[in-house]
Image (cartoon, rainbow, N blue to C red):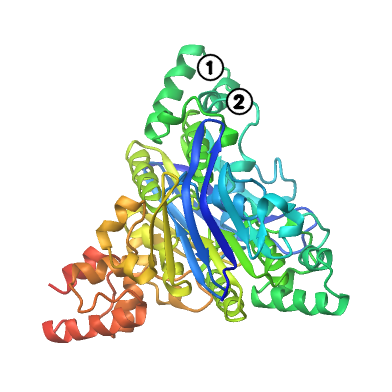
Amino acid sequence: MTARLTLHAVTYHYPASPAPALTNVSLEVPSGAVTALIGNVGAGASTLLLVAGDLAPRVMGGELTGSVERAGRAALLLPTPWTQVSGMAFTVHDEVAFGPANLGWPRERISASVERALTRVDVAHLRDRDPATLSGGELQRVIFAGILAMEPEVLLLDEPTAELDPLAARRVWELIRSLAAGGMAVIVATNDIDALPDVADRVVWLESGTIRAQGPAAQVLVDRGLAADDAPGSTAVAAVWRAAGLGEPPPLTVSQAVERLR
Amino acid sequence: MSAVLDLRAVTFAYGGRTALDDVSLALRPGERVALVGHNGAGKSTLMRLITGLLKPSAGSVLVGDWDTRERRPEELATRVGSVFQHADQQLFARTVREDVAFGPRAIGVAAGEVAARVARALGALGLDAVSEEHPYDLPPPWRKLAAFAGALALEPTLLVLDEPTAGLDRLARRRVAAALTERAAQGTALLVITHDLDFAAATLDRGLVLDHGRLVRDAALAELLALGEGLETLGLAAPPLSRLSTALALPGHPIRAQEVASALASVAARNRVS
């Protein structure tokens, strides 16, 4: 697997902010895999996505030291979809076409890419709706479709399931897996720790702007430190397994627990 | 005791599209209620009707003895505190503290009491350290917490919240849960739109389910969570501990962490698993 994105010793300050939002962060993001960023609000996960997407410092301002290498086009899904809607389209179809149209692609390519994206994100039935009338969850998926329609090689997702009902969230996690299987490099910041054993290949745990731990998901997610009061938490199954005083390392999912008790 | 909120056969349509269809329900003081359902089921529309931003096409919405048709939203705000899904954009003051103080000041709370309420709300949500910052310098989940602090400081008879834990980390989720529990103990009724059933199980005790604009369930939350796979038809997914309970057939189908852990310990002892 080739690295699509490499951060080397990155330290970043937002404008007029005395404390750095990221300190000495080094990270390699491979293609064909899902890398999950976990950490408390303010730990730096969203900032890391802005840096990876070339929005910080290029658009946000601020100061960055260290190096960032990108191989391929990156696209970022913000956690607040209502701030990401173009406001210039009166139908979902045109909203999804907005990104690719701005890449200057020929009409046929735009149209094919939009159709593919609408279907993949399961919003084809909304194509004629006005984006302004959608629910939060529907809008989040429409914006996701708009990002996929630009056919990025690096997909940056900030809390992509925050506005979704549980079944819609599960479909988005499955979509994320299949995009990675298709060769995309995916980085996703999330507080949904319970989703990660089945979704993430690698986990990066951020704390106060630094990397506290990173590695294969199965390894990072059993870290006892995750269960501390001010940490992101372990999976619900791992937590009750330990509370029951059973053997280390704990299972992370329901099916792993059933397996262990067989 | 009289109802804090009383919806009588409420119907609402956006143009030709019916968003709520003949919904009736009532909330008593101090009740802790979860409102759940698919994206697009009508949850946010219900919230806009309760806060008076929309008026029902048919039926009536009563907040205490006020009919929302006869009151302006700012008048209703003296009884209903609300945090919308886009709450990160409902802030406007220069500091978080000023923003939280705006509501109680606007409804005529005395200055000394405003300061005390603001301090309590900021403390309860862990926002002390950022109280002098500009709201838009904070990450969106914290802005939503600031909007929540503003609603708490109103000390309303009814709080309606749209996804108060979305995007929050575990520590902040716990603070929100504790603040809500405390407010309900003071008599505020809670109506919380949420997909976070772990949070709901720990904080709320009655569950309303909307499906395609209709109220299809009104039951004890524990009863809803025990439906297991049956939750899926309602647009919900059983939380991991509920699924673990089902998969291991734990006696009594526990769903709260402590009870699941002790049931697990006895199963393991029986199987002599280390």
Q: Position of residue B43 (x, y in %)?
A: 51, 51
Q: Quadrant of residue A60?
A: top right
Which element is circle 1 on? Answer: loop
For this rendering, which residue is in front, B72 or B1?
A: B1
Of mark 1 and mark 2, the one earlier in the sequence is 2
Q: Position of residue A262 (x, y in %)?
A: 12, 72
> Residue B271: in sight, yes or no?
yes
The subunit carrying tag 2 is A
Which element is circle 2 on? Answer: loop
For this rendering, which residue is in front, A234 or B63?
A: B63
Q: Residue at x 58, y 43 (%)?
A: A81
Q: Which residue is mark 2?
A: A89
For this rendering, which residue is in front, B129 or B231?
A: B231
User: On screen, A181 above or below B112?
Assistant: above
On the same chain, marks 1 and 2? The answer is yes
User: On screen, A223 above or below B13?
Assistant: below
Crowd band around label 2 with a 10 angstrom C-alpha radius: few (<14), some (14–19), many (20+)? some
Alpha carbons under labels 1 and 2: distance apart: 18 Å
Q: Position of residue A50 (x, y in %)?
A: 61, 47
* Amino acid found under the numbered disc labelled 2: Ala
> Residue A209: in sight, yes or no?
no
Q: Position of residue B178 (x, y in %)?
A: 56, 77
Q: Which mark is residue A230?
A: none
For this rendering, which residue is in front, B20 or A21?
A: B20
Left or right of B179 in this view: B257:
left
Q: Which residue is mark 1?
A: A105
Crowd band around label 1 with a 10 angstrom C-alpha radius: few (<14), some (14–19), many (20+)? few
User: On screen, B104 above or below B187?
Assistant: above
